[in-house]
Image: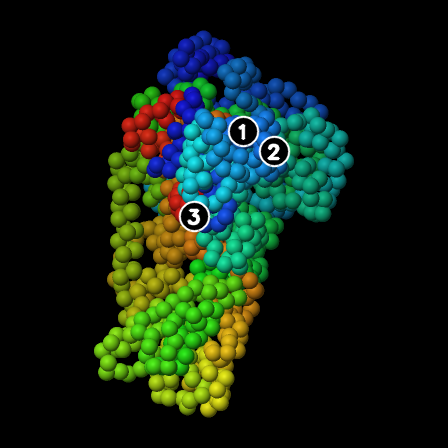
């Protein structure tokens, strides 16, 4: 392990990445390279009318690397993000704010964590005031976002406070969350007050917020502009198309946010290793995980602003739930060698419990006795008309797993996370089945793989725009091709016809189709 | 790379060719029918081939063909220069042609001889014989027409009556696509509204008004069901209906058939039970193609030959879409009449009662028959004099087209595939309304909205599906 400042990518004579060049240690050879530059690539910080080349928190920006990437023929664009001022914790008067308790849910981030976490930290909520908005309006002439100094595109969904004030002039106040940055540290993060106004204005602005009158700013908020790749330069395995063996992850791919970055790091890492081992890339579909949605959106459609995963971006969100995350992904992780055997055993147990309990509920007929009638009346649901199973009852909107306990005497003791999956799967079984059909339908198009070396200019029936867009994106499947903007259904039909034609010719032994496409 | 694609050999799909890079030709009018037949050539070499074969009336080749002009001249053999046929030639340069390629059409004398000789000459000049549906496929692939329009071409080709042809033409101009497209826009709007609340449930985005979602989903469902009914009508216009003429012996079934068809088809005698087997013919009522089937008289009989005819008649009645029950108005209503009325009214499509022989002194009126007609309309006619036939035809057409209260008039042409998609889209929207009405979270209802969207897109071909192309173009015949 070396820590060094990377200034360039080494490319071997065959065009593939062969290592990196560092300022401190010169050349470092590698079978595959993953770069995750965060907001450091060509980073430039703005605070009011001042700006300087820098990474976040005063660290050095990566200036040479950006130029190196451009020289490799990779297209770069410039995005912007911002952060809010940090204040000293003991300078805040939380008595003037509303307490925000964390949700007490018996779930952890992973199923290995069971039970509630007792050590949750408090946060507080306060609001900007008319005075805050006045200060901001009076100083817009010194806000780099409005003077034209910053040209990079920022994320729409977490705008700076000055942007909010300008865009929603009718709003009298905006939320400000006070969040301790670390458990025991003395620094507080002001969520909602992201800004790049000059430091003296920030001082005034922060002090106009109830509870922050005396707040001591430790670090002013700032905007940072940085370089990132046009993400359509990437394959779904997060490898650059122009430089095989070069993988990228995180902000460099045009995203914003921790989870977005972390998930790409995982995928890029997996695929770099698979590449070195000469194995097929690992790609999650849109119906597998939000990671699949994220990466497919990026590499198929590109993005014109820092990309964040939004629930609505996933068309199969009923299937992409937290409670079934392991059911969707642990098996895949295990096959890749990323899941420990003990953890896999735990997963198998959980899956078995879920399946058994679901089978039990859909086969268990509810006795039509007086006790049942009483329970149903308590729940407030209609009496039984005909033979009914516990599963049927659970499908009723007003019935919960918990409320059925009195008439479900053989119920086994199960972990709450198992009960949750079972309840959701049975309650929404109809919709889950419909979505499964939709996924299946879409998967048929995802399964139609387009030969990687296909020459779109030689395929009859494609529009000029489709040829250009498809040659650029180089989708791996018909399904992905259909999502490329500028590609019409007629183009997809022509592509399908072409692929069929190749299959036909391969089958009949005529090789000219394959040769024509350059394979 | 791509060199062999230009040869046109590469893009074969299970044996059916399709390529935009070679020149194709075919006879594009039905063989053996009509005084004029058309040989169509489409592709990059269409003009070159056309001008090699076409001469102006004085035998000159130069400028015999002219873009956008219909030219009179002769088609000659490319090797011998011998005249094959006289023809009108039109040349349509890309992209303003049906296929968006260069197109030349020779309108020659109909008949297999000259047409195949002209086509043969075209093929000898380097064109390839077009596969079934290949012209339309090219029009579709070039973006000239959408899928619904491509299917309209099939309908036009198959249309039996003018009404059917008019409907198909309306589709070719985008009728079905436009109707479905308007509903699709509303479905997309509904989806967008439901999903707007998904990302920021705690934010200021107003939660969707559930009652409003139910109302809109129901409205869209109704509009789709309306299209579906009109599509069923379109199918009636295209495929027609089978109408069985039934009744006890000697009430004038065969005479009525002749009156409806307008010529003597069935042998008409006074001897009861003359019609032993079904006699049938096509006619058109109000634009609806109708296959009329005359049947043997229905009655209890000991005669084994007649018994056979009766059984056959009953079969015909069961197979028919509609029945005309013929009753003799100059005789009292018999038990046999009542039995036939009961039998016919139980049939799939119901029927109409023709109270025949209105030219003779009437023993019975419509009012006498109505109680036994079980809801079937009663129309007095005289098959012999031809009176009341118009009214009878109108009634049958109305029954065939299923005029339903609240559903707009007119038909729309849709293929079986499209009608199925209409039905499934309507059902999905019904599910949206029911679900939201019963308290399902709107986000779940979005699954049904997406389902509706999928099926609507299947109608116009907006969303890709891997088998749709084959299913459509395999229905074509060569030359279209």
Q: Nearer the viewer, residue A360 or A32?
A: A32
* Residue A150 occupies quadrant: top right
**Chain of the residue that carries numbered disc 3 in the rendered image:** B
Kindly indicate whether the residue at mark 1 contacts the one at mark 3 (C-beta within 8 angstroms).
no
Q: CA distance from mark 2 to mark 3?
A: 29 Å
Q: Is residue B46 left or right of residue B341?
A: right
Q: Name the residue beneath numbered marker 2.
A: B67
Q: Name the residue beneath numbered marker 3.
A: B32
Q: What residue is drawn where x is 45% and y is 69%?
A: B263
Q: Is residue B65 left or right of residue B318?
A: right
Sequence-wise, the earlier of marks 2 and 1 is: 1
Q: Nearer the viewer, residue A478 or B341?
A: B341
Q: Residues within 10 Å of mark 2 (few under 14, many from 20)?
A: some
Across and down, in percent, residue B330 comes to 45, 88
Sequence-wise, the earlier of marks 2 and 3 is: 3
Across and down, in percent, residue B119 comes to 44, 36
Q: Residues within 10 Å of mark 1 (few under 14, many from 20)?
A: some
Across and down, in percent, residue B285 comes to 50, 67
Q: What residue is drawn where x is 49% and y is 10%?
A: A23
Image quarter (top left, top right, bottom left or bottom right) of the N terminus of chain B? top left
Q: Is residue A231 above or below residue B408?
A: above
Q: Secondary structure at mark 3?
A: loop
**Is the same chain shared between marks 3 and 1?**
yes
- Residue B140 in view, yes or no: no
Q: Name the residue beneath numbered marker 1.
A: B51
Q: Nearer the viewer, residue A496 or B73?
A: B73
Q: Secondary structure at mark 1?
A: helix
Q: Is residue B348 above or below residue B378?
A: above
Q: What residue is drawn where x is 40% and y is 32%?
A: B11
Sequence-wise, the earlier of marks 3 and 1 is: 3
Q: CA distance from mark 2 to mark 1?
A: 12 Å
**Chain of the residue that carries numbered disc 1 in the rendered image:** B
């Amino acid at each position: 392990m070396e820590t060094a400042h990377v200034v360039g990518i080494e490319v071997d004579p065959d065009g593939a990445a062969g290592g990196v060049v560092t300022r401190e240690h010169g050349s470092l050879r590698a079978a595959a390279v993953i770069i995750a530059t965060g907001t450091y690539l060509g980073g430039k910080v703005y605070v009011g009318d001042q700006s300087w080349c820098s990474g976040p928190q005063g660290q050095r920006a990566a200036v040479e690397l950006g130029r190196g990437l451009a020289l490799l023929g990779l297209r770069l664009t410039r995005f912007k993000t911002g952060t809010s001022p940090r204040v000293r914790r003991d300078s805040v008067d939380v008595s003037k704010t509303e307490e925000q308790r964390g949700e007490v849910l018996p779930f952890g981030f992973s199923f290995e964590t069971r039970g509630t976490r007792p050590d949750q930290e408090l946060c507080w909520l306060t609001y900007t005031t008319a005075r805050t908005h006045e200060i901001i309006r009076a100083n817009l002439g010194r806000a780099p976002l409005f003077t034209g100094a910053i040209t990079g595109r920022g994320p729409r969904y977490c705008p700076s406070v000055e942007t909010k004030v300008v865009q929603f002039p009718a709003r009298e106040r905006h939320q400000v969350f006070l969040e301790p940055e670390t458990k025991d540290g003395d620094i507080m993060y002001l969520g909602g007050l992201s800004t790049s106004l000059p430091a003296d204005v920030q001082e005034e602005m922060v002090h106009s917020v109830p509870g922050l009158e005396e707040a001591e700013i430790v670090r002013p908020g700032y905007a940072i502009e940085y370089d990132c790749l046009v993400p359509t330069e990437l394959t779904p395995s997060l490898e650059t198309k122009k430089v095989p063996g070069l993988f990228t992850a995180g902000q460099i791919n045009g995203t914003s946010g921790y989870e977005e970055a972390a998930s790409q790091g995982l995928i890029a890492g997996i695929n770099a290793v698979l590449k070195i081992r000469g194995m097929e890339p690992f790609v999650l579909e849109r119906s597998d995980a939000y990671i699949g949605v994220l990466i497919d959106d990026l590499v198929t459609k590109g993005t014109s602003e820092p990309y964040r995963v939004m629930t609505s971006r996933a068309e199969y969100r009923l299937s992409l739930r937290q409670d079934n995350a392991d059911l969707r992904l642990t098996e895949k992780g295990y096959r890749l060698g990323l899941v420990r055997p003990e953890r896999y055993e735990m997963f198998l147990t959980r899956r078995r419990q879920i399946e058994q309990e679901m089978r039990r509920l859909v086969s268990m007929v509810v006795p039509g006795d007086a006790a049942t009638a009483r329970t149903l009346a308590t729940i407030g649901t209609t009496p039984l008309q005909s033979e009914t199973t516990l599963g049927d009852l659970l499908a009723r909107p007003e019935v919960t797993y918990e409320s059925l306990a009195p008439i479900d005497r053989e119920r086994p003791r199960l972990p709450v996370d198992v009960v949750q999956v079972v309840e959701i799967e049975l309650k929404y079984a109809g919709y889950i089945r419909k979505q499964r059909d939709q996924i299946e339908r879409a998967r048929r198009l995802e399964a139609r793989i387009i030969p990687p070396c296909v020459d779109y200019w030689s395929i009859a029936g494609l529009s000029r725009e489709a040829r250009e867009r498809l040659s650029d994106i180089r989708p791996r499947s018909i399904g992905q091709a259909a999502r490329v903007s500028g590609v019409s259904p007629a183009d997809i039909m022509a592509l399908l016809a072409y692929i069929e034609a190749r299959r036909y010719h391969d089958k009949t032994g005529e090789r000219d189709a394959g040769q024509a496409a350059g394979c | 790379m791509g060199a062999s694609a230009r040869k046109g050999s590469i893009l074969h799909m299970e044996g059916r060719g399709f390529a935009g890079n070679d020149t194709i030709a075919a006879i594009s009018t039905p063989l053996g029918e009509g005084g004029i037949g058309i040989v169509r050539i489409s592709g990059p070499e269409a003009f070159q081939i056309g001008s090699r074969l076409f001469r102006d009336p004085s035998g000159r080749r130069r400028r015999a063909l002219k873009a956008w002009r219909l030219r009179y001249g002769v088609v000659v053999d490319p090797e011998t220069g011998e005249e094959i046929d006289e023809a009108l030639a039109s040349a349509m340069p890309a992209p303003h042609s049906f296929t968006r390629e260069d197109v030349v059409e020779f309108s020659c004398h109909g008949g297999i001889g000259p047409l195949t000789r002209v086509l043969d000459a075209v093929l000898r000049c380097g064109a390839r014989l077009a596969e079934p549906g290949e012209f339309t496929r090219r029009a579709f692939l070039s973006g000239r027409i959408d899928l619904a329009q491509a299917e309209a071409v099939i309908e036009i080709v198959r249309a039996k009556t003018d009404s059917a042809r008019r409907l198909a033409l309306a589709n070719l101009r985008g009728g079905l696509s436009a109707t479905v497209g308007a509903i699709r826009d509303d479905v997309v709007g509904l989806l967008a509204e439901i999903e707007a609340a998904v990302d920021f449930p705690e934010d200021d985005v107003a939660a969707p008004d559930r009652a409003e979602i139910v109302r809109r989903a129901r409205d869209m469902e109704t509009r789709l069901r309306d299209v579906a009914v009109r599509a069923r009508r379109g199918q009636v216009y295209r495929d027609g209906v089978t109408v069985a003429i039934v009744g006890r012996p000697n009430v004038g079934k065969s005479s009525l058939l002749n009156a409806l068809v307008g010529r003597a088809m069935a042998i008409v005698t006074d001897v009861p039970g003359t019609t032993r087997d079904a006699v049938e013919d096509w006619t058109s009522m109000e634009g609806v193609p109708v296959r009329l089937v005359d049947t043997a008289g229905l009655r209890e009989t000991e005669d084994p030959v007649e018994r056979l005819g009766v059984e056959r008649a009953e079969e015909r009645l069961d197979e028919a879409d509609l029945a005309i029950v013929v009753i003799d108005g100059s005789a009292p209503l018999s038990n046999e009449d009542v039995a036939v009325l009961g039998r016919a009214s139980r049939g799939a499509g119901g029927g109409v009662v023709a109270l025949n022989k209105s030219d003779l002194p009437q023993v019975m009126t419509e009012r006498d028959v109505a109680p036994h007609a079980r809801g079937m309309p009663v129309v007095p006619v005289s098959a012999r004099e031809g009176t009341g036939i118009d009214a009878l035809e109108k009634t049958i057409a109305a029954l065939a087209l299923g005029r339903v209260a609240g559903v707009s008039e007119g038909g729309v042409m849709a293929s079986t595939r499209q009608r199925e998609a209409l039905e499934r889209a309507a059902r999905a929207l019904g599910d949206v309304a029911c679900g939201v009405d019963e308290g399902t979270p709107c986000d779940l209802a979005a699954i049904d909205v997406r389902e509706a969207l999928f099926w609507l897109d299947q109608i116009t071909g907006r969303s890709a599906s891997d088998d749709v192309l084959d299913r459509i173009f395999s229905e074509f015949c060569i030359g279209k």
